[in-house]
Image (tube, rainbow, N blue to C red):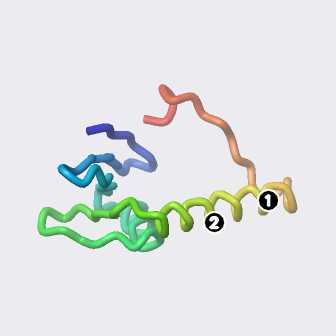
Amino acid sequence: MEAFVIHDTTIRLQPTEPSGETLIRVQPTPFGQRLAQLLDGQPQANGDYVIRHTPEVDGRMLDVIDTLITLRYSQPGLVQLQLLLPETIA
């Protein structure tokens, strides 16, 4: 299971068997809750949110990325996106 942390929120990628579908497990922090709501995540008994990786979820992710890129180009002084190396994210 691959995991990473953004805004003190652990996000885990978990392949399921036998379908090969990937589940995205998001820790229930304020940031994690908003991310899960955006991507149609469902709360689980252990408190985590689970997002099934589907073409619709891919579409939502791309829409968010496209929106942020458009915002950055149209208002360069408003949004400062920075590329972070993986070791600086956690």
Q: Residue at x 68, y 40 (%)?
A: 82
Task: Report helix, strand or loop for mark 2.
Answer: helix
Q: Which residue is mark 1?
A: 78
Q: Residue at x 38, y 59 (%)?
A: 53
Q: Nearer the viewer, residue 23 or 83?
A: 23
Q: Quadrant of the C terminus?
A: top left
Task: Report helix, strand or loop for mark 1.
Answer: loop
Q: Quadrant of the N terminus?
A: top left
Q: Nearer the viewer, residue 90 or 63?
A: 63
Please give left or right for residue 16 compared with residue 37 in the image. left
Please give left or right for residue 3 compared with residue 82 in the image. left
Discs 1/2, front = 2
Q: Residue at x 24, y 71 (%)?
A: 43
How far, Cα to Cα, is label 1 from label 2? 19 Å
The kind of residue tagged 2 is Asp
Please give left or right for residue 79 compared with residue 84 in the image. right
Upstream in the sequence, badge 1 or badge 2?
A: 2
**Where residue 19 sits: x, y (%)?**
24, 54
Give the numbered dot on residue 6.
none
**Where residue 62 sits: x, y (%)?**
61, 60
* Image quarter of residue 31: bottom left
* Image quarter of residue 71: bottom right
Q: Residue at x 38, y 48 (%)?
A: 8
Q: Which residue is mark 2?
A: 63
